[in-house]
Amino acid sequence: MITKKTPAEIEKMRIAGAVVARCLKDISEQIVPGKTTTLDIDHMSEDLIRKYGAISSFKDYRGYPNTVCVAVNEEVVHGIPNGRILLPGDIIGIDLGAIVDGWHGDSAITVAVGGKASDEAMRLLRVTKEALFKGIEQARPGKRLSDIGHAIQSYVERHGYSVVRDLVGHGIGRSMHEEPHVPNYGAPGRGVRLEEGMTLAIEPMVNIGTYEVETLGDSWTVVTKDGSLSAHFEHTVAIRRDGPDILTALPTEEA
Ligand code: MF3
Ligand code: CO
């Protein structure tokens, strides 16, 4: 069942979403190329989530051992923080979820360590972020669920990249993962009709090469099968009468 949220509940989710947005911004500003490890990012995440009065959505979720997922280069998602030092030109997906007053926010960004990477990597980041916004544009009453994935897939493939099939976005609210699944691919005009009050985490994962992925022996880290670079962006979005409302954006005065 898809649970619809009232405007007051959506405001509660926006508080959790703002915590996630601030954490992601603070983390990306604190990374020192050649020094920061992915485990340092985990510690930063723990400290920041606590500082902003929230708790982690991820820690202990189905046995997940950390607070954040950090996916480096050919890693797609669910990278477990470890002692790996981040080097200039690496691209890293940072995926974070926080709970405030029982409501979840979930968002991810992919950034270049040190602010720049290869032209191809920078283009991948731009196209993936733009694809997320193409999907978000479809999150409005009267559209159908698969219009989101269709918009994402069309945009990504038009730019020569591929969309991961094995992992999808999700409904979100009092739980991090609620119905429905939100695929990033598919034919338009299928699935449930989108209605005011639905809240979705939309999260395209885009690879330069094949869309196929595999999971490493740690049973979490997902990597591209061909070793090509991958990027991931995610926002928690509420469907409002007049269109999408991004709950994991920074409040405008800070954006
Ligand atoms: N944002 C991811 C998701 O939506 C992260 C959850 S993975 C976790 O599925 F296990 F670390 F929680
Ligand atoms: Co998610």
Image: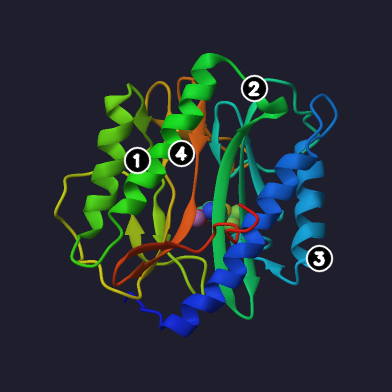
Name the residue located 41 percent from the left edge and 60 percent from the top edge: 170
Residue 65 location, x and y as percent?
71, 54
Q: CA distance from mark 4 to mark 3?
A: 28 Å
Q: Residue at label 2? A: 116
Tell me which amino acid carries mark 4: Lys
Residue 129, numbered label: 4
Residue that badge 1 annotates: 165
Q: Residue at x 55, y 70 (%)?
A: 14
Q: Colour scheme of this structure image?
A: rainbow
Q: Report, in whole angstroms, how far the alpha carbon at label 1 lies from the one at label 2.
A: 28 Å
**Looking at the image, is mark 4 or mark 2 earlier in the sequence?**
2
Locate residue 121 relative to residue 56 in the image: left or right: left
Lower sequence index among marks 3 and 1: 3
Please identify, in this view, whether the residue under mark 4 or under mark 1 is nearer the observer.
Answer: 4
* Closer to us: 250 or 10: 250
Say which label, 4 or 3, has the lower sequence index: 3
Residue 185 visible, this angle = no
Q: Nearer the viewer, residue 37 or 152?
A: 152
Q: Mark 4: which secondary structure?
A: helix
**Whole-percent x, y for residue 137 in the image:** 31, 52
**CB within 8 Å, label 4 to label 1:** no
Location of the N terminus (image quadrant): bottom left
The residue beneath circle 3 is 51
Q: Residue at horizontal 34%, vertical 55%?
A: 182
Q: Amino acid at mark 1?
A: Arg
